[in-house]
Image (cartoon, coloured by chain):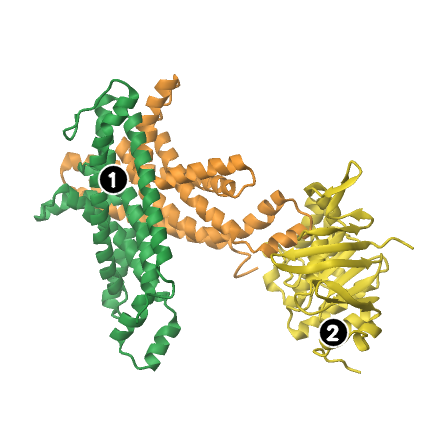
Chain colours: A yellow, B orange, C green
Amino acid sequence: MTQPIIQFDKVVKRFGDVTVLNQLDFNVQRGEKVTIIGPSGCGKSTVLRILMTLEGIDSGVIHVAGKPLWHQYRNGSLAPADEDHLREMRKEMGMVFQQFNLFPHMTVRRNVTEAPIHVLGLSRDEANERAEHYLDLVGLSDQADKFPRQLSGGQQQRVAIARALAMKPNIMLFDEPTSALDPELVGEVLNVIQRLAGEHDLTMLLVTHEMQFAKQISDRVCFFHAGRVLEEGPPEQVLTDPRESRTREFLKAFIHPA
Amino acid sequence: MEWLSYSKPLLEGAWVTVQLTFFSTLLGGLFAFAFGIGKISHNALARGVAIFFIEIFRGTSLLVQLFWLYFALPVLGQAIGVDLRLPPLVAGTLALSLNIGAYGAEVVRGAIQAVPPSQHEAAKALDFTPRQILWRIALPQAIPEMMPSFGNLAVQNLKDTALVSLISLGDLAFRAEQIRNFTQDSTTVYTLLLLMYFGMALVLTGIMKLLERSVGRWRTGGT
Amino acid sequence: MLLGIEWNTANDWAFALSILPILLKGLVVTVQATVVGFGIAAVLGLVLAALKASPLRLISWPARIVTEFIRDTPLLAQLFFLYYVLPEYGIVLPAFLTGALALGLQYSAYTSEVYRAGIESVARGQTDAARALDLSALRTFRVIILPQAIPRIIPALGNYLVSIMKDVPVLSVVSVLEMLNVAKIIGDRTFNYLIPLSMVGGLYLIMTLFASAGVRYLDMRLPKQGLPLR
């Protein structure tokens, strides 16, 4: 059996008195498209943030691409990771945020090329080429010289996706990418994500409330509850005919066309 | 009309004031960034130095600072065998810039810390180093925030330059005093003095507003 | 000898100790100038704020120009003006009062801003509600606006009090014997500026620390929603 590209082992994460992740075991295979659903506070965004090294963990071990994420090997045993190790590991992942978080003082093109140039060390020409490619992929090559405030929410989010992709990560993390968008703009972003899902080698982890969309692109859907995976399986099973009553309860709030 | 004959020496003094304001505001701006960024640095030494200067130059009177640099520092120099006599221009510029730098530091620090954490997160996700995040992401967004306060500080600095006349630097206030001493025509001289400072302040405010607008171009208005 | 006290030049420590009482006499003058100047600024600022708020352009515009003029010209220039020009029109004030007046004038421009901002910061909804309840304008101001504006105004005024204190040394040019002037005279006579001026710096730091702490304490104690009315 191939080693999972993401492996959570008995991970615990607390915020003050609240235990958000409770001895979580969670795996994702290379190239798999996994959607995480669940009520607010169940830890689904936290999982993504921990993977992106924006939050640490209180106990347990996480492996990404076979290497420990928040730990590193020193003299043969596991010790907490230092900043250099985290920086190396970060390169595996790219993240798209709910609020897009584009850099407002930079043009679209610069938003996409800044990290490839100053983090990956690409030349300006190489970075521009990459930017052109990914902006084209998300359908925004003609907006390259605009500033974020001149774009709609949907356009900004697509730029954010291009920006993350330009770093060529192996894993893409989407944290409620359409929740902050007006309904008529949701479709254009979902289309882009769907196109990405066609790439075999790209592992995708998606947190969303768009159940129809989740059904379309996911290989697996995980329902999180109280900091653990309560139920998981193919989307047709989890989303249409879940085994657990809590999953059923949760999904009642979402309209299922037949 | 006497005020015409006063205008030549007054304008010469005004020119000194303008240069003094320009250089001390510029240097003060540098100090503001140095102290402001130093205060939120991870390096304890940088933090200590920054806080030291900020507290001293915000907690004491500008005139005290000026007199100390001009009168007291040389005495200190004598005691340790180094010639620390500062010419009035140096002492004046230094006191003014350290003073405005200390006040500006709080503006800088506040503006940097006002940049939304989500920006830091997005930059971290792209694997920028903390230093890159500060210089490429946070500072450019903080600077337009600082400009209104910097505008006020610049005008305050202009007014403060008048104090250097007390260490015999030939600025506008000094020349006005000279003329009054000579002619005893207080009303005309001092009315002119006030009007000239007012005029300079209005021009300076205009310049700062222009700067404010050009620096915040990506926030509002045209492409 | 200054202000009736001799100093001791035996060594640095004796010197410092012996001039301390002289400096403290200067400190008293500094505090007095601060208080009087602040009092004038607080009252004058209120007048200016009221004038600026007048619906009559004939009153509000000149008031605004005057405020801007005061705010944009140096304290030193204003002090010279008052000290030398007033006597030419028959008004002769002692130097201390002239100095306090100059301080009060300069800072009235700032305090008028504090009053305006404090009153405007009381939410529009409050005045709307008062009007809906048919409260008179005077009652609205006294009972609704003022109690809510005061917790914002007082700390801001307190900060300007501290600023006034730091501007008092400017009064030395008209021979007011505040702390810096005293130190400078001692320095002029002994050629040792370092000790007196450094001590003045230290005394200022201490005073600023206390004053700022006092303002913070006041800020903490004043309820943010407004002074309670039973």
Residue in the image at 82% along x and 58% along y: A28
Amino acid on which the number 2 mark rests in the picture: Arg
Q: Secondary structure at mark 2?
A: helix
Looking at the image, residue B54 sits to the left or right of residue B16; the answer is right
Closer to us: C133 or A167: C133
Name the chain under label 2: A
The residue indicated by pointer 1 is: C170
Name the chain under label 1: C
In percent of width and height, residue A188 lies at 72, 69
Q: Secondary structure at mark 1?
A: helix
Spatial separation of the CA atoms under disc 2 and disc 1? 75 Å
Residue in the image at 45% along x and 44% along y: B105
Q: Is residue C48 visible?
A: yes
Residue in the image at 27% along x and 51% along y: C107
Amino acid on which the number 1 mark rests in the picture: Val
Q: Is residue C25 above or below residue C160?
A: above
Q: Is residue B178 above or below residue A66?
A: above
Closer to us: A74 or A49: A74
The residue indicated by pointer 2 is: A246
Q: Is residue B27 visible?
A: no
